[in-house]
Image (spheres, helix red, strand yellow):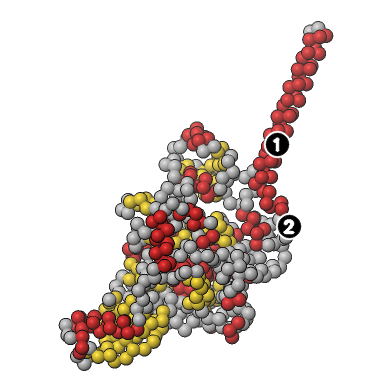
Amino acid sequence: MNRNNFFIHLALALVLVLVAAFAGQLSRWRKQWKNQVRIGPVAEKKQPRTSEEIALSETRSLGSPEVLVKFKSGVSSEAIDALTSRFHDRVEDRLENAEGWTAVDDLDNADASSIVAQYSQLPEVEYAEPNYEINLEEAGAGPLEPILPHDPQFNDQWALANSGQRGGKQGADISATLAWATTTGSNKLVVAVLDTGVDYTHEDLMENMWVRPATLEPYHDNELGTIDDLNGFNAIDSAADPMDDNGHGTHCAGIIGAEGENNLGIAGVNWKVQIMPLKFLNAGGSGSTKDAIEAINYVINRKKAGVNVRIISASWGSTQRSRALGDVIRKAYENDILFVAAAGNSSVDNDRTPHYPSSYPNVISVAALDRHDELASFSNWGVKSVMIAAPGVDILSTWLNNEYEEKSGTSMATPVVSGVAALMLAKNPRMTVEDLRKRLMDSTDPIVKLKGKTVSGGRINAAKALE
Amino acid sequence: MRLSAFAGDNSQEQRIQGGRLNPRMANTKDGAVENARNDLAQRLKIDAASVKEHSVEDADFPDMALGAAEDGEMSGQMMTRGWRIKLEAEGQTYEYRADKNQVRLHNFKGKNYRI
Protein backbone atom coordinates (compact mmCIF):
# COMPACT_ATOMS: atom_id res chain seq x y z
CA MET A 1 0.00 0.00 0.00
CA ASN A 2 1.47 3.34 -0.98
CA ARG A 3 1.49 6.30 1.36
CA ASN A 4 -1.46 8.09 -0.36
CA ASN A 5 -3.74 5.02 -0.25
CA PHE A 6 -2.97 4.55 3.43
CA PHE A 7 -4.16 8.08 4.28
CA ILE A 8 -7.28 7.71 2.10
CA HIS A 9 -8.22 4.46 3.95
CA LEU A 10 -7.47 6.03 7.31
CA ALA A 11 -9.68 9.03 6.50
CA LEU A 12 -12.51 6.77 5.33
CA ALA A 13 -12.30 4.70 8.52
CA LEU A 14 -12.46 7.84 10.65
CA VAL A 15 -15.51 9.09 8.74
CA LEU A 16 -17.27 5.75 9.22
CA VAL A 17 -16.54 5.76 12.96
CA LEU A 18 -17.87 9.32 13.27
CA VAL A 19 -21.03 8.49 11.30
CA ALA A 20 -21.70 5.43 13.49
CA ALA A 21 -21.15 7.38 16.68
CA PHE A 22 -23.45 10.19 15.53
CA ALA A 23 -26.16 7.72 14.49
CA GLY A 24 -25.97 6.09 17.91
CA GLN A 25 -26.28 9.44 19.64
CA LEU A 26 -29.22 10.34 17.42
CA SER A 27 -30.98 7.18 18.49
CA ARG A 28 -30.34 7.97 22.16
CA TRP A 29 -31.59 11.57 21.65
CA ARG A 30 -34.71 10.25 19.95
CA LYS A 31 -35.43 7.86 22.80
CA GLN A 32 -34.81 10.55 25.42
CA TRP A 33 -37.08 12.95 23.59
CA LYS A 34 -39.83 10.33 23.36
CA ASN A 35 -39.60 9.59 27.06
CA GLN A 36 -39.62 13.27 27.94
CA VAL A 37 -42.81 13.69 25.98
CA ARG A 38 -44.40 10.81 27.88
CA ILE A 39 -43.33 11.77 31.35
CA GLY A 40 -43.34 15.52 30.99
CA PRO A 41 -46.18 16.06 33.46
CA VAL A 42 -44.43 13.94 36.08
CA ALA A 43 -41.41 16.17 36.09
CA GLU A 44 -43.58 19.24 36.57
CA LYS A 45 -45.19 17.96 39.76
CA LYS A 46 -43.74 19.59 42.82
CA GLN A 47 -46.09 18.91 45.72
CA PRO A 48 -45.48 15.45 47.16
CA ARG A 49 -48.30 13.05 47.86
CA THR A 50 -51.05 15.02 46.22
CA SER A 51 -53.81 13.06 44.58
CA GLU A 52 -52.48 13.96 41.13
CA GLU A 53 -49.03 12.69 41.93
CA ILE A 54 -50.43 9.53 43.36
CA ALA A 55 -52.46 9.08 40.22
CA LEU A 56 -49.24 9.22 38.27
CA SER A 57 -48.06 6.14 40.12
CA GLU A 58 -49.87 4.28 37.39
CA THR A 59 -47.76 5.76 34.61
CA ARG A 60 -45.54 3.38 32.76
CA SER A 61 -41.84 3.34 33.41
CA LEU A 62 -39.45 4.77 30.83
CA GLY A 63 -39.46 2.84 27.64
CA SER A 64 -41.72 0.06 28.95
CA PRO A 65 -44.19 -1.54 26.54
CA GLU A 66 -47.79 -0.36 26.55
CA VAL A 67 -49.63 -3.64 26.40
CA LEU A 68 -49.20 -7.34 27.00
CA VAL A 69 -50.86 -9.46 24.33
CA LYS A 70 -51.48 -13.18 24.52
CA PHE A 71 -51.63 -14.59 21.01
CA LYS A 72 -53.38 -17.88 20.39
CA SER A 73 -51.23 -20.95 20.11
CA GLY A 74 -50.11 -21.56 16.55
CA VAL A 75 -49.72 -17.89 15.69
CA SER A 76 -46.18 -17.61 14.39
CA SER A 77 -43.62 -14.98 15.34
CA GLU A 78 -43.72 -13.72 11.77
CA ALA A 79 -47.47 -13.31 11.91
CA ILE A 80 -47.18 -11.45 15.22
CA ASP A 81 -44.55 -9.15 13.74
CA ALA A 82 -46.80 -8.48 10.75
CA LEU A 83 -49.79 -7.69 12.96
CA THR A 84 -47.87 -5.30 15.19
CA SER A 85 -46.36 -3.57 12.14
CA ARG A 86 -49.84 -3.12 10.73
CA PHE A 87 -50.77 -1.11 13.83
CA HIS A 88 -47.48 0.77 13.72
CA ASP A 89 -46.37 -1.02 16.88
CA ARG A 90 -43.38 -3.19 17.56
CA VAL A 91 -42.72 -6.33 19.55
CA GLU A 92 -40.75 -5.30 22.59
CA ASP A 93 -40.35 -8.76 24.02
CA ARG A 94 -41.62 -12.30 23.66
CA LEU A 95 -42.08 -13.23 27.30
CA GLU A 96 -40.32 -16.33 28.45
CA ASN A 97 -42.25 -18.72 30.72
CA ALA A 98 -45.48 -17.14 29.57
CA GLU A 99 -46.43 -18.98 26.42
CA GLY A 100 -48.01 -16.77 23.81
CA TRP A 101 -47.54 -13.53 25.73
CA THR A 102 -45.87 -10.72 23.88
CA ALA A 103 -45.01 -7.26 25.14
CA VAL A 104 -45.99 -4.71 22.50
CA ASP A 105 -44.75 -1.14 22.29
CA ASP A 106 -46.91 1.41 20.51
CA LEU A 107 -44.97 3.86 18.38
CA ASP A 108 -47.83 6.36 18.18
CA ASN A 109 -48.05 6.87 21.94
CA ALA A 110 -51.75 5.99 21.90
CA ASP A 111 -53.82 5.35 25.01
CA ALA A 112 -53.18 1.85 26.43
CA SER A 113 -56.88 0.98 26.66
CA SER A 114 -57.33 1.78 22.96
CA ILE A 115 -54.40 -0.45 22.05
CA VAL A 116 -55.82 -3.22 24.22
CA ALA A 117 -59.18 -2.88 22.48
CA GLN A 118 -57.48 -2.94 19.08
CA TYR A 119 -55.63 -6.18 19.79
CA SER A 120 -58.48 -7.82 21.64
CA GLN A 121 -60.58 -7.79 18.49
CA LEU A 122 -58.07 -9.72 16.44
CA PRO A 123 -58.96 -13.37 15.88
CA GLU A 124 -55.31 -14.28 16.51
CA VAL A 125 -55.44 -12.81 20.02
CA GLU A 126 -56.66 -14.57 23.10
CA TYR A 127 -56.30 -11.70 25.51
CA ALA A 128 -54.67 -8.27 25.86
CA GLU A 129 -54.13 -6.07 28.88
CA PRO A 130 -52.32 -2.83 29.71
CA ASN A 131 -48.79 -3.23 31.01
CA TYR A 132 -49.40 -1.71 34.39
CA GLU A 133 -46.52 -0.61 36.47
CA ILE A 134 -46.60 -1.56 40.10
CA ASN A 135 -45.30 1.49 41.83
CA LEU A 136 -43.24 0.96 44.92
CA GLU A 137 -42.50 4.59 45.65
CA GLU A 138 -45.29 4.82 48.19
CA ALA A 139 -43.79 2.13 50.41
CA GLY A 140 -42.10 3.45 53.50
CA ALA A 141 -43.05 7.03 52.74
CA GLY A 142 -44.08 7.65 56.33
CA PRO A 143 -47.45 8.27 57.95
CA LEU A 144 -50.15 9.49 55.60
CA GLU A 145 -51.86 12.83 55.99
CA PRO A 146 -55.62 12.89 55.37
CA ILE A 147 -56.73 14.58 52.18
CA LEU A 148 -59.99 16.51 52.27
CA PRO A 149 -61.77 17.36 49.03
CA HIS A 150 -63.45 20.71 48.45
CA ASP A 151 -66.72 19.29 47.15
CA PRO A 152 -69.33 21.49 48.86
CA GLN A 153 -71.45 18.70 50.39
CA PHE A 154 -68.52 16.60 51.56
CA ASN A 155 -69.26 17.44 55.19
CA ASP A 156 -72.53 15.54 54.90
CA GLN A 157 -70.75 12.39 53.75
CA TRP A 158 -70.35 10.79 57.16
CA ALA A 159 -69.51 7.44 55.59
CA LEU A 160 -66.27 8.88 54.24
CA ALA A 161 -65.37 11.14 57.16
CA ASN A 162 -67.45 10.91 60.32
CA SER A 163 -66.67 13.91 62.49
CA GLY A 164 -69.69 13.27 64.69
CA GLN A 165 -71.94 15.35 62.47
CA ARG A 166 -75.66 14.96 63.22
CA GLY A 167 -74.93 13.08 66.42
CA GLY A 168 -72.84 10.36 64.80
CA LYS A 169 -69.84 8.61 66.30
CA GLN A 170 -66.60 10.29 65.38
CA GLY A 171 -64.39 7.98 63.34
CA ALA A 172 -67.21 5.58 62.44
CA ASP A 173 -66.32 5.84 58.76
CA ILE A 174 -64.26 4.05 56.13
CA SER A 175 -61.15 6.23 56.60
CA ALA A 176 -61.50 7.56 53.06
CA THR A 177 -59.48 10.72 53.70
CA LEU A 178 -56.46 8.66 54.72
CA ALA A 179 -56.96 6.29 51.81
CA TRP A 180 -56.93 9.25 49.42
CA ALA A 181 -53.40 10.03 50.53
CA THR A 182 -52.46 6.83 48.74
CA THR A 183 -54.78 7.01 45.76
CA THR A 184 -57.96 8.76 44.72
CA GLY A 185 -58.70 6.20 42.05
CA SER A 186 -57.85 5.56 38.44
CA ASN A 187 -59.68 6.44 35.26
CA LYS A 188 -58.18 3.33 33.71
CA LEU A 189 -60.36 1.12 35.88
CA VAL A 190 -63.98 0.31 35.00
CA VAL A 191 -66.63 -0.53 37.61
CA ALA A 192 -69.93 -1.90 36.31
CA VAL A 193 -73.03 -0.68 38.14
CA LEU A 194 -75.71 -3.28 37.50
CA ASP A 195 -78.88 -1.47 38.46
CA THR A 196 -81.61 0.90 37.18
CA GLY A 197 -79.04 2.44 34.83
CA VAL A 198 -77.08 5.58 35.61
CA ASP A 199 -77.80 9.22 34.76
CA TYR A 200 -74.57 9.57 32.84
CA THR A 201 -75.27 13.26 32.24
CA HIS A 202 -75.23 14.07 35.97
CA GLU A 203 -72.82 16.94 36.54
CA ASP A 204 -70.95 15.07 39.25
CA LEU A 205 -70.69 11.81 37.29
CA MET A 206 -70.29 12.66 33.63
CA GLU A 207 -66.50 12.92 33.70
CA ASN A 208 -66.25 9.51 35.35
CA MET A 209 -68.54 7.62 33.02
CA TRP A 210 -67.36 4.80 30.81
CA VAL A 211 -67.85 5.45 27.11
CA ARG A 212 -67.15 2.73 24.58
CA PRO A 213 -63.80 3.58 22.99
CA ALA A 214 -63.91 4.34 19.29
CA THR A 215 -61.59 1.39 18.72
CA LEU A 216 -64.07 -1.05 20.27
CA GLU A 217 -66.79 -2.39 17.99
CA PRO A 218 -70.43 -2.07 19.14
CA TYR A 219 -71.50 -5.03 21.23
CA HIS A 220 -72.65 -8.09 19.39
CA ASP A 221 -74.65 -10.89 20.91
CA ASN A 222 -75.86 -13.89 18.92
CA GLU A 223 -79.34 -13.57 20.39
CA LEU A 224 -79.63 -9.79 20.63
CA GLY A 225 -77.72 -8.84 17.51
CA THR A 226 -75.53 -5.74 17.37
CA ILE A 227 -76.14 -3.13 20.05
CA ASP A 228 -74.77 0.39 20.21
CA ASP A 229 -73.37 0.31 23.74
CA LEU A 230 -71.82 3.76 23.58
CA ASN A 231 -72.86 4.53 27.17
CA GLY A 232 -73.33 1.03 28.54
CA PHE A 233 -75.93 -1.69 28.23
CA ASN A 234 -79.68 -1.91 28.74
CA ALA A 235 -80.78 -5.51 29.29
CA ILE A 236 -84.48 -4.61 29.48
CA ASP A 237 -84.54 -3.09 26.02
CA SER A 238 -81.33 -3.65 24.14
CA ALA A 239 -82.31 -0.91 21.66
CA ALA A 240 -82.40 1.67 24.46
CA ASP A 241 -79.53 3.21 26.33
CA PRO A 242 -78.83 2.67 30.04
CA MET A 243 -80.15 6.05 31.21
CA ASP A 244 -81.53 5.79 34.73
CA ASP A 245 -85.28 6.35 35.08
CA ASN A 246 -85.44 5.68 38.80
CA GLY A 247 -82.46 7.22 40.62
CA HIS A 248 -81.23 4.16 42.53
CA GLY A 249 -78.44 3.30 40.07
CA THR A 250 -77.34 6.93 39.89
CA HIS A 251 -77.13 6.98 43.68
CA CYS A 252 -74.98 3.85 43.76
CA ALA A 253 -72.76 5.21 40.97
CA GLY A 254 -72.14 8.42 42.92
CA ILE A 255 -71.06 6.49 46.00
CA ILE A 256 -68.47 4.64 43.94
CA GLY A 257 -67.28 7.48 41.78
CA ALA A 258 -68.79 10.95 41.97
CA GLU A 259 -66.00 13.14 40.68
CA GLY A 260 -63.90 14.48 43.54
CA GLU A 261 -62.39 17.92 43.99
CA ASN A 262 -64.57 19.43 41.25
CA ASN A 263 -66.34 21.92 43.51
CA LEU A 264 -69.65 20.20 42.84
CA GLY A 265 -71.85 18.19 45.20
CA ILE A 266 -70.07 15.24 46.72
CA ALA A 267 -66.94 13.12 46.37
CA GLY A 268 -67.16 9.43 45.53
CA VAL A 269 -64.99 6.84 47.23
CA ASN A 270 -63.09 7.18 43.95
CA TRP A 271 -62.54 10.71 42.69
CA LYS A 272 -61.81 9.29 39.30
CA VAL A 273 -62.87 5.97 37.85
CA GLN A 274 -64.96 4.76 34.93
CA ILE A 275 -68.53 3.82 35.78
CA MET A 276 -70.11 1.43 33.28
CA PRO A 277 -73.92 1.71 33.48
CA LEU A 278 -75.92 -1.49 33.11
CA LYS A 279 -79.68 -1.30 33.27
CA PHE A 280 -81.76 -4.32 34.21
CA LEU A 281 -83.98 -2.88 36.95
CA ASN A 282 -86.99 -0.97 35.64
CA ALA A 283 -88.30 2.44 36.66
CA GLY A 284 -89.86 0.87 39.75
CA GLY A 285 -86.55 -0.69 40.82
CA SER A 286 -87.33 -4.30 39.93
CA GLY A 287 -86.02 -6.63 37.28
CA SER A 288 -85.81 -10.20 36.10
CA THR A 289 -83.15 -12.82 36.69
CA LYS A 290 -82.82 -13.29 32.93
CA ASP A 291 -81.97 -9.63 32.37
CA ALA A 292 -79.47 -9.68 35.23
CA ILE A 293 -77.74 -12.66 33.62
CA GLU A 294 -77.70 -10.93 30.25
CA ALA A 295 -76.06 -7.84 31.76
CA ILE A 296 -73.43 -9.89 33.63
CA ASN A 297 -72.65 -11.72 30.42
CA TYR A 298 -72.22 -8.35 28.74
CA VAL A 299 -69.61 -7.37 31.34
CA ILE A 300 -67.73 -10.64 30.92
CA ASN A 301 -67.70 -10.27 27.14
CA ARG A 302 -66.56 -6.68 27.34
CA LYS A 303 -63.72 -7.70 29.63
CA LYS A 304 -62.71 -10.36 27.14
CA ALA A 305 -62.77 -7.67 24.47
CA GLY A 306 -60.20 -5.67 26.41
CA VAL A 307 -62.28 -3.36 28.64
CA ASN A 308 -60.59 -3.18 32.04
CA VAL A 309 -63.79 -3.91 33.98
CA ARG A 310 -62.91 -5.61 37.26
CA ILE A 311 -65.91 -5.05 39.56
CA ILE A 312 -69.67 -5.54 39.33
CA SER A 313 -71.63 -3.69 41.98
CA ALA A 314 -75.03 -5.30 42.60
CA SER A 315 -77.30 -3.41 45.01
CA TRP A 316 -80.27 -5.72 44.55
CA GLY A 317 -81.52 -9.18 45.32
CA SER A 318 -84.24 -11.61 46.21
CA THR A 319 -84.70 -14.67 48.37
CA GLN A 320 -85.15 -16.88 45.33
CA ARG A 321 -82.21 -18.92 44.23
CA SER A 322 -81.40 -19.15 40.56
CA ARG A 323 -78.83 -21.68 39.47
CA ALA A 324 -78.34 -19.79 36.19
CA LEU A 325 -77.55 -16.56 38.02
CA GLY A 326 -75.14 -18.39 40.31
CA ASP A 327 -73.42 -19.89 37.28
CA VAL A 328 -72.91 -16.57 35.50
CA ILE A 329 -71.55 -14.99 38.70
CA ARG A 330 -69.09 -17.86 38.95
CA LYS A 331 -68.14 -17.18 35.34
CA ALA A 332 -67.49 -13.53 36.22
CA TYR A 333 -65.29 -14.68 39.09
CA GLU A 334 -63.36 -16.97 36.76
CA ASN A 335 -62.77 -13.94 34.54
CA ASP A 336 -61.30 -12.02 37.47
CA ILE A 337 -64.31 -9.80 38.03
CA LEU A 338 -65.23 -9.11 41.66
CA PHE A 339 -68.96 -9.35 42.35
CA VAL A 340 -70.16 -7.25 45.30
CA ALA A 341 -73.78 -7.64 46.41
CA ALA A 342 -76.24 -6.29 48.98
CA ALA A 343 -77.01 -8.61 51.90
CA GLY A 344 -80.65 -7.48 51.96
CA ASN A 345 -82.86 -5.32 54.17
CA SER A 346 -85.19 -7.75 55.90
CA SER A 347 -83.43 -7.88 59.29
CA VAL A 348 -82.89 -11.61 58.96
CA ASP A 349 -80.03 -14.04 59.26
CA ASN A 350 -78.89 -14.94 55.75
CA ASP A 351 -77.33 -18.14 57.07
CA ARG A 352 -80.88 -19.33 57.69
CA THR A 353 -82.74 -17.40 55.01
CA PRO A 354 -80.35 -16.91 52.12
CA HIS A 355 -80.55 -13.81 49.98
CA TYR A 356 -79.35 -13.89 46.38
CA PRO A 357 -77.07 -13.02 44.73
CA SER A 358 -75.29 -12.11 47.99
CA SER A 359 -75.44 -15.69 49.31
CA TYR A 360 -73.79 -17.26 46.26
CA PRO A 361 -70.18 -18.35 46.65
CA ASN A 362 -67.59 -15.99 45.16
CA VAL A 363 -69.61 -12.91 46.11
CA ILE A 364 -68.69 -10.21 48.63
CA SER A 365 -71.94 -9.71 50.52
CA VAL A 366 -72.36 -6.45 52.37
CA ALA A 367 -74.34 -5.50 55.50
CA ALA A 368 -75.19 -1.90 56.39
CA LEU A 369 -74.00 0.19 59.32
CA ASP A 370 -75.39 3.43 60.67
CA ARG A 371 -73.43 6.53 61.71
CA HIS A 372 -72.99 5.09 65.23
CA ASP A 373 -71.20 1.94 64.00
CA GLU A 374 -74.30 -0.12 64.74
CA LEU A 375 -75.69 -2.70 62.36
CA ALA A 376 -78.59 -0.90 60.65
CA SER A 377 -81.95 -1.97 62.03
CA PHE A 378 -83.01 -3.21 58.59
CA SER A 379 -79.79 -4.96 57.61
CA ASN A 380 -79.51 -8.70 57.09
CA TRP A 381 -76.54 -10.43 58.66
CA GLY A 382 -74.90 -13.86 58.64
CA VAL A 383 -71.74 -15.01 60.35
CA LYS A 384 -71.17 -17.48 57.53
CA SER A 385 -72.72 -15.72 54.59
CA VAL A 386 -72.34 -11.93 55.04
CA MET A 387 -68.74 -10.93 54.52
CA ILE A 388 -68.37 -7.35 55.59
CA ALA A 389 -70.21 -4.25 56.80
CA ALA A 390 -70.12 -0.73 55.40
CA PRO A 391 -72.01 2.53 55.97
CA GLY A 392 -75.51 2.30 54.54
CA VAL A 393 -77.82 4.68 56.42
CA ASP A 394 -78.52 8.28 55.37
CA ILE A 395 -75.96 8.11 52.60
CA LEU A 396 -75.80 11.24 50.46
CA SER A 397 -75.20 10.68 46.77
CA THR A 398 -76.15 11.71 43.27
CA TRP A 399 -79.75 11.51 42.04
CA LEU A 400 -81.59 12.27 38.82
CA ASN A 401 -81.63 15.79 37.35
CA ASN A 402 -78.33 16.90 38.90
CA GLU A 403 -79.75 16.45 42.36
CA TYR A 404 -78.42 14.76 45.51
CA GLU A 405 -80.41 12.67 47.99
CA GLU A 406 -79.86 10.72 51.18
CA LYS A 407 -80.89 7.07 50.96
CA SER A 408 -80.56 4.00 53.18
CA GLY A 409 -80.14 0.31 52.52
CA THR A 410 -77.62 -2.40 51.94
CA SER A 411 -77.94 -0.98 48.42
CA MET A 412 -75.90 1.97 49.66
CA ALA A 413 -73.37 -0.10 51.64
CA THR A 414 -72.59 -2.25 48.59
CA PRO A 415 -71.09 0.50 46.38
CA VAL A 416 -68.96 1.64 49.32
CA VAL A 417 -67.26 -1.75 49.22
CA SER A 418 -67.13 -1.74 45.42
CA GLY A 419 -65.53 1.69 45.62
CA VAL A 420 -62.88 0.55 48.06
CA ALA A 421 -62.10 -2.44 45.85
CA ALA A 422 -61.69 0.01 42.97
CA LEU A 423 -59.20 2.05 45.01
CA MET A 424 -57.26 -1.15 45.71
CA LEU A 425 -57.12 -1.93 42.01
CA ALA A 426 -56.10 1.64 41.24
CA LYS A 427 -53.13 1.16 43.51
CA ASN A 428 -52.35 -2.35 42.35
CA PRO A 429 -54.07 -3.33 39.10
CA ARG A 430 -52.61 -6.81 39.21
CA MET A 431 -54.62 -7.86 42.27
CA THR A 432 -56.76 -10.88 41.53
CA VAL A 433 -60.30 -11.32 42.77
CA GLU A 434 -58.95 -13.63 45.45
CA ASP A 435 -56.38 -10.99 46.48
CA LEU A 436 -59.16 -8.41 46.71
CA ARG A 437 -61.42 -10.65 48.77
CA LYS A 438 -58.68 -11.53 51.21
CA ARG A 439 -57.44 -7.97 51.60
CA LEU A 440 -60.94 -6.59 52.07
CA MET A 441 -61.66 -9.13 54.77
CA ASP A 442 -58.31 -8.67 56.51
CA SER A 443 -58.45 -4.89 56.69
CA THR A 444 -61.64 -4.18 58.59
CA ASP A 445 -61.99 -2.25 61.82
CA PRO A 446 -63.38 -4.76 64.33
CA ILE A 447 -66.75 -3.82 65.80
CA VAL A 448 -67.77 -5.76 68.88
CA LYS A 449 -71.44 -5.79 67.96
CA LEU A 450 -70.66 -7.31 64.56
CA LYS A 451 -69.06 -10.34 66.15
CA GLY A 452 -71.24 -13.26 65.23
CA LYS A 453 -73.02 -11.16 62.65
CA THR A 454 -70.59 -11.11 59.72
CA VAL A 455 -67.62 -13.19 58.61
CA SER A 456 -65.12 -10.39 59.13
CA GLY A 457 -66.80 -8.91 62.20
CA GLY A 458 -65.80 -5.44 61.16
CA ARG A 459 -66.36 -2.27 59.18
CA ILE A 460 -64.51 -1.83 55.93
CA ASN A 461 -61.48 0.47 56.19
CA ALA A 462 -60.25 1.88 52.89
CA ALA A 463 -56.94 3.14 54.27
CA LYS A 464 -56.06 -0.25 55.74
CA ALA A 465 -57.08 -1.96 52.52
CA LEU A 466 -54.50 0.15 50.68
CA GLU A 467 -51.62 -0.47 53.08
CA MET B 1 -67.10 17.09 27.60
CA ARG B 2 -68.63 13.68 26.99
CA LEU B 3 -71.87 15.10 25.62
CA SER B 4 -70.00 16.09 22.49
CA ALA B 5 -70.03 12.41 21.63
CA PHE B 6 -73.75 12.77 20.96
CA ALA B 7 -73.43 15.68 18.58
CA GLY B 8 -75.48 14.93 15.52
CA ASP B 9 -77.24 11.98 17.14
CA ASN B 10 -80.69 13.38 17.65
CA SER B 11 -82.23 10.18 18.90
CA GLN B 12 -79.65 9.93 21.65
CA GLU B 13 -80.22 13.54 22.68
CA GLN B 14 -83.95 12.99 22.71
CA ARG B 15 -83.55 9.98 24.94
CA ILE B 16 -81.49 11.98 27.39
CA GLN B 17 -83.94 14.84 27.36
CA GLY B 18 -86.77 12.38 27.63
CA GLY B 19 -85.26 10.93 30.79
CA ARG B 20 -84.81 14.35 32.35
CA LEU B 21 -87.71 16.45 31.21
CA ASN B 22 -90.53 13.94 31.09
CA PRO B 23 -90.65 12.26 34.47
CA ARG B 24 -93.05 9.36 34.74
CA MET B 25 -96.53 9.91 36.03
CA ALA B 26 -96.23 9.43 39.78
CA ASN B 27 -98.79 7.75 42.03
CA THR B 28 -100.52 9.81 44.69
CA LYS B 29 -101.76 8.19 47.88
CA ASP B 30 -105.39 8.56 46.81
CA GLY B 31 -104.64 7.28 43.34
CA ALA B 32 -102.87 4.24 44.78
CA VAL B 33 -105.84 3.44 47.05
CA GLU B 34 -108.19 3.72 44.10
CA ASN B 35 -106.02 1.40 42.00
CA ALA B 36 -105.85 -1.09 44.84
CA ARG B 37 -109.60 -1.04 45.36
CA ASN B 38 -110.30 -1.67 41.69
CA ASP B 39 -107.73 -4.44 41.55
CA LEU B 40 -109.18 -6.26 44.53
CA ALA B 41 -112.72 -5.98 43.18
CA GLN B 42 -111.57 -7.46 39.91
CA ARG B 43 -109.74 -10.35 41.59
CA LEU B 44 -112.68 -11.19 43.86
CA LYS B 45 -115.17 -10.50 41.08
CA ILE B 46 -117.17 -8.12 43.26
CA ASP B 47 -118.30 -4.52 42.93
CA ALA B 48 -115.61 -1.96 43.80
CA ALA B 49 -118.10 -0.14 46.04
CA SER B 50 -118.19 -3.16 48.35
CA VAL B 51 -114.44 -2.94 49.00
CA LYS B 52 -113.86 -0.91 52.15
CA GLU B 53 -110.80 1.02 53.19
CA HIS B 54 -109.55 -0.45 56.48
CA SER B 55 -106.44 1.74 56.90
CA VAL B 56 -103.87 3.67 54.91
CA GLU B 57 -100.60 4.53 56.60
CA ASP B 58 -97.15 5.72 55.64
CA ALA B 59 -94.62 2.91 55.77
CA ASP B 60 -90.96 2.13 55.10
CA PHE B 61 -90.53 -0.97 52.99
CA PRO B 62 -87.32 -3.00 52.89
CA ASP B 63 -86.74 -2.83 49.15
CA MET B 64 -87.91 -1.32 45.90
CA ALA B 65 -90.42 -4.10 45.39
CA LEU B 66 -91.94 -2.88 48.67
CA GLY B 67 -91.23 -6.22 50.32
CA ALA B 68 -93.68 -7.83 47.91
CA ALA B 69 -91.54 -9.16 45.08
CA GLU B 70 -93.15 -11.49 42.58
CA ASP B 71 -91.64 -14.90 41.83
CA GLY B 72 -88.26 -14.50 40.16
CA GLU B 73 -88.22 -10.74 40.62
CA MET B 74 -85.07 -8.96 41.81
CA SER B 75 -85.29 -5.56 43.44
CA GLY B 76 -83.05 -2.75 44.60
CA GLN B 77 -82.16 -3.10 48.28
CA MET B 78 -82.97 0.48 49.22
CA MET B 79 -85.41 1.36 52.00
CA THR B 80 -88.45 2.76 50.23
CA ARG B 81 -91.04 5.11 51.65
CA GLY B 82 -94.62 4.41 50.61
CA TRP B 83 -98.08 3.53 51.86
CA ARG B 84 -99.50 0.39 53.41
CA ILE B 85 -103.10 0.13 52.24
CA LYS B 86 -105.40 -2.35 53.97
CA LEU B 87 -108.73 -3.08 52.34
CA GLU B 88 -111.65 -5.20 53.52
CA ALA B 89 -113.95 -7.30 51.41
CA GLU B 90 -116.13 -10.29 52.14
CA GLY B 91 -114.93 -10.39 55.74
CA GLN B 92 -111.25 -10.58 54.81
CA THR B 93 -108.45 -8.00 55.02
CA TYR B 94 -106.07 -7.57 52.09
CA GLU B 95 -102.80 -5.65 52.12
CA TYR B 96 -101.61 -3.51 49.25
CA ARG B 97 -98.31 -1.65 49.23
CA ALA B 98 -97.67 1.37 47.09
CA ASP B 99 -95.24 4.15 46.40
CA LYS B 100 -94.99 6.81 43.75
CA ASN B 101 -93.89 4.19 41.19
CA GLN B 102 -96.12 1.20 41.80
CA VAL B 103 -98.94 -0.61 43.60
CA ARG B 104 -98.49 -4.20 44.79
CA LEU B 105 -100.71 -6.78 46.41
CA HIS B 106 -98.93 -8.52 49.28
CA ASN B 107 -99.45 -12.18 50.10
CA PHE B 108 -102.69 -12.79 48.24
CA LYS B 109 -103.29 -16.51 48.57
CA GLY B 110 -99.58 -16.93 49.26
CA LYS B 111 -98.33 -14.83 46.35
CA ASN B 112 -97.37 -11.24 45.63
CA TYR B 113 -98.58 -9.31 42.61
CA ARG B 114 -97.46 -6.10 40.91
CA ILE B 115 -100.54 -4.38 39.51
Q: Quadrant of the N terminus of chain A?
A: top right
Residue at the spot of label 2: A46
Q: Residue at x 42, y 74 (%)?
A: B77
Q: Which label number is shown at residue B82? A: none
Considering depth in this image, is A320 or B18 the residue closer to the camera? B18
Chain of the residue under the numbered disc 1 shown in the image: A
Q: Is residue A157 above or below residue A53?
A: below
Q: Earlier in the sequence, mark 1 or mark 2?
A: 1
Q: Residue at x 50, y 65 (%)?
A: A202
Identify the residue at the far top of this view.
Answer: A2
Indicate which label's residue lies in the foreground, 1 or 2. Answer: 2
Element type at marker 2? Answer: loop
- Can residue B83 be seen by looking at this rendering? yes
> What is the quadrant of residue A371 in the picture?
bottom right
- Can residue A360 be seen by looking at this rendering? no
Residue at the spot of label 1: A28
Percent from the top left, x then y, of residue B11? Answer: 38, 56
Percent from the top left, x then y, of residue A196? Answer: 40, 67
Amino acid type at image mark 1: Arg
Element type at marker 1? Answer: helix
Q: Quadrant of the C terminus of chain A?
A: bottom right
Circle 2 crowding by C-alpha within 10 Å: few under 14, some 14–19, many from 20: few
